Amino acid sequence: MIRPFAETDLAAVMELWLASNLQAHPFIAPSYWAEHLEEVKSLLPQAEVYVDESGGVVNGFLGLMGQGEIAGLFVAAHARGQGIGTRLMRKAKELYDELSLSVYEKNARAVHFYRREGFQLVEKREDPDTGQVEYRMRWAKSRVDTMKGGAKMGPIVYVGQKNTMHSVIAAAVCNKMAQRWRLAGLCAVSAGLAVQEGAPACAAAVQAAREFGLELSAHRAQPLSAGLIERAGMLVALNQADYDALVRLVPPERVYLQESGKDVSAGDVWACRRSVDQAFDGFQDLWLTLRGSV
């Protein structure tokens, strides 16, 4: 349950703050966090803080300062992998149309999480207190009209390289879920950055998809054209390299990173089965992002 911070949470929140910072930042001397403990404790009452609690235990908390500045988002080690960070971030997105934060470059886990949540890198700088490189990242609600009341948006375009495997699978899963959830205004297509136009989906992808009730045999690869970019409601990259390529073509707020796992051989059926699984999980995260954009 997410609720506003109470004074009785102070000890648990500060313990979590210290433990999380020590664990996430082994590249910074532990004394730095200990020295700042009392300062953070004194600032906490001035912040907008929400905690995730279950059974009387604080599992995570979100701290906001000013207008949408995320001062910190922390999840206890024992509670990770349960969606608590995502729920806390969803709370922040409900409260503000724009969010910003600072995160150390070496804190790869956090950087990955914020990118998945739609945050874009806007500045790279050195923290004068630690000498470490930190990122300034920003999120803004998309102007895409999503599917409330069946309102239509441009197609979601899943982008890969050859457009014969992962991007094809992800688009098929999106369309299947839109049908299952009766999202009349949502549809998906796929395209590639380096395609052999007209190439079919690879045999492994076709076989794996059929096991999940998806049919890819009619697919033919298409390039990511200027016209398709213009019509797209959202562009979805399935790995960091493709994401970086897309944000060189369009504003970052139009691109969503939905990682589908490691690149694998086109003949690997097992990997394509895994890609289908990940596409179903990824769609749920994407749908939460779209709902938060309304």
Image (spheres, grey):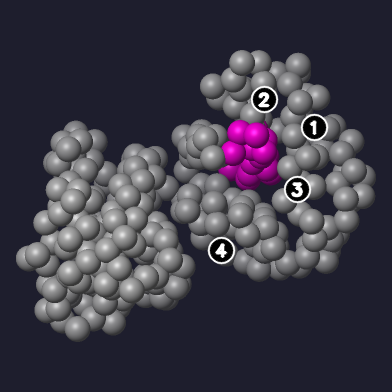
Label 4 vs 1, first from the N-terminus = 1
Closer to us: 251 or 213: 213
90 is higher (above) or lower (below) than 276: above
Q: Are marks 1 and 2 in contact (CB under 8 Å)?
A: no
**Label 4, label 2: how far apart the Cα atoms are:** 30 Å
**Label 4, label 1: how far apart the Cα atoms are:** 30 Å
Badge 3 amino acid: Gln
Say which element carries label 1. Answer: helix
Residue at the disc numbered 2: 58
Residue at the disc numbered 4: 121
111 is higher (above) or lower (below) than 226: above
Say which element carries label 2. Answer: strand
Percent from the top left, x then y, of residue 118?
Answer: 46, 53
Badge 2 amino acid: Val
Query: Of the numbered discs in the image, which one, if any, rests on residue 23?
Result: 3
Percent from the top left, x then y, of residue 278?
Answer: 36, 52
